Image (cartoon, helix red, strand yellow):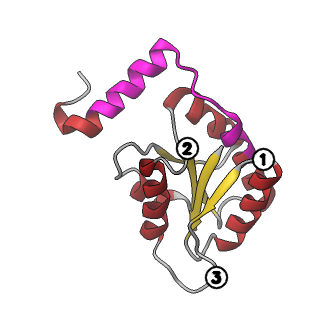
Amino acid sequence: MRIAIGADHHGYLLRREIIELLASQGHQAMDVGTDGPEPTDYPDAARDVARAIIAGDAERGIVICGSGAGVSIAANKFPGVKAAAVSDTFTAHQCVEHDAVNVLCLGAETVGRWLALDIVRAFVGAQFTGEERHRRRVGKIEAFERDGLGGGD
């Protein structure tokens, strides 16, 4: 699987470890940076991962900031991106299986290294079930994105 990965300055070290994990599992990581501790803006990391998803250069994305919340908010502003801030393995696979999430958002300051790697394993190992109830619910979300307040009826 092709996975875009980016981070702000809080997540650059964890980003490196995740890239190594993905490579060891046979995935292709598209690294969109940040490479050091100099302050960077988390919306930029989310944007760069979202661009890769929208362009079809990556099937999924992972973006890291201090809490995971900021990058999740930013990533969800892009059409076609379904991002979730995740801090446990159940949510990591369930958000893909039921909600068709394609961008995992992690908090480098809130999730320990080992748990973060387990979360990534669960996220990349999951597939959308395609069950009717999940397709219906995801369809409503997509209508909200497309039609604004009038969507999803």
Q: Decide: few, some or many residues near mark 1? Use Cα within 10 Å; few <14, some 14-19, many ≥20.
A: few
Q: Position of residue 3 (x, y in %)?
A: 61, 51
Q: Position of residue 131 (x, y in %)?
A: 52, 15
Q: Is residue 59 above or below residue 130?
A: below
Q: Decide: few, some or many residues near mark 2? Use Cα within 10 Å; few <14, some 14-19, many ≥20.
A: some
Q: Residue furthest bottom?
A: 38
**Magenta stretch?**
121-143
Q: Position of residue 150 (x, y in %)?
A: 16, 31
The residue beneath circle 3 is: 36
Identity of the amino acid at label 3? Gly
Note whether residue 112 is visible: no
Residue at image coords 68%, 36%? 90
- Left or right for 152, reference 24: left
Q: Is residue 60 above or below residue 142?
A: below
Instruction: Measure the C-alpha gap from mark 2 to mark 3.
Output: 26 Å
Secondary structure of residue under mark 3: loop
Identity of the amino acid at label 1? Gly
| Mark linked to residue 26 | 1
| Among the two numbered marks 1 and 3 on one chain, the one whose residue lies closer to the N terminus | 1
